[in-house]
């Protein structure tokens, strides 16, 4: 009986030892699993740390940009940008100078054309004067002569050609004297005429467009 009691006690002790051993093994397994989980968590947190470190790179970039800036917070220009700006400014200046040269050349060309046209017109006007003097001295019978009629047609053709290029006679007789268009060679007192009025025209004046080719030679009253 006593022997059986000892065997039961031994079995209970063995069972308790087995349970204790099992609990120890389980604790070790739980501890190992916890360590592995902790390592995985650290690995996952590492990229976040790298991301958090990124602003340091931005700070370095900002520091580099700040070094490139000069006074008043203006960013310093690279040598290449400065060269581009200088070349652009030079090209723009040359284009402006060329445009001014072109306009000046066109103006001079127009002026030379006008001077040349005036010179030719001045040489033609004495011929026109002779035609008019000749017609003024003809009698009524002479005007009916075919030769005179032919000369009158030539005269009208010449006047039409001059008018086509912009030549027009200056109105003088009965107009107020204007030194810009008239050349007074005589003065007379005439109660019937108004003050400073042209009463006689000795030589007709002409305009080429808006400029005077020849002033009218006139007599002015009062």
Image (cartoon, rainbow, N blue to C red):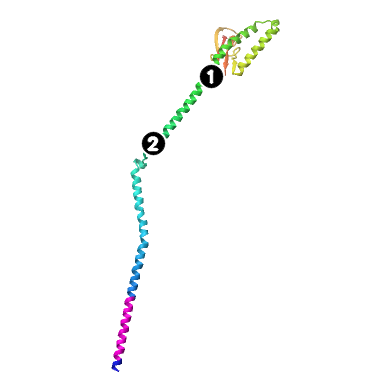
Which of pointers 1 and 2 indicates the residue nearer the eye?
2
Is most of the magenta stretch helix, strand or loop? helix
Residue 87 position, x and y percent, is 41, 34
Residue 204, how many percent across, how many down? 59, 11
- What residue is pinned by disc 2? 83
Asked if residue 148 can be seen in this view, the reply is yes
Instruction: Report which quarter residue 150 is drawn in.
Output: top right
Q: Which mark is drawn over residue 113?
A: 1
12 drawn magenta: yes
Residue 21 highlighted magenta (yes or no): yes
Q: Pick the quarter of the image with the C terminus.
A: top right
SS for dot 1 = helix
Residue 46: x and y in percent read 35, 60
Between the residue at mark 1 and the residue at mark 2, the CA separation in whole angstroms equals 45 Å
Q: Position of residue 178 (x, y in %)?
A: 55, 14
Mark with earlier residue (1, 2): 2
User: Toward the viewer: 178 or 110?
Assistant: 110
Left or right position of 135 against 71? right
Q: Determine the secondary structure under disc 2.
A: helix
Span of residues in magenta: 5-25
Which labelled disc corresponds to residue 3? none
- Which residue shows up at 65% across the image and 12% down it? 154
Mark 1, residues whose alpha carbon is within 10 Å: few (<14), some, or many (≥20)? Answer: few
């Amino acid at each position: 009986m006593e022997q059986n009691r000892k065997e039961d006690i031994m079995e209970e002790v063995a069972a308790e030892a087995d349970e204790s051993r099992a609990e120890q093994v389980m604790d070790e397994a739980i501890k190992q699993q916890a360590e592995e989980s902790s390592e995985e968590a650290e690995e996952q947190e590492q990229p976040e740390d790298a991301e958090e470190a990124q602003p340091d790179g931005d700070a370095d970039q900002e520091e580099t940009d700040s070094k490139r800036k000069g006074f008043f917070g203006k960013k310093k220009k690279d040598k290449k940008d400065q060269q581009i700006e200088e070349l652009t400014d030079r090209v723009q200046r040359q284009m402006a100078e060329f445009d001014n040269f072109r306009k000046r050349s066109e103006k001079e060309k127009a002026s030379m054309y006008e001077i040349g046209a005036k010179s030719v017109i001045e040489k033609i006007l004495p011929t026109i004067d002779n035609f008019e003097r000749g017609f003024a001295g003809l009698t009524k019978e002479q005007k009916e002569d075919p030769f005179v009629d032919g000369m009158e047609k030539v005269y009208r053709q010449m006047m039409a050609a001059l008018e086509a290029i912009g030549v027009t006679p200056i109105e003088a007789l009965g107009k107020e004297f204007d030194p810009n268009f008239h050349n007074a060679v005589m003065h007379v007192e005439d109660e019937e005429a108004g003050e400073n009025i042209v009463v006689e025209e000795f030589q007709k004046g002409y305009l080429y467009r808006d400029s005077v080719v020849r002033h009218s030679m006139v007599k002015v009253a009062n």
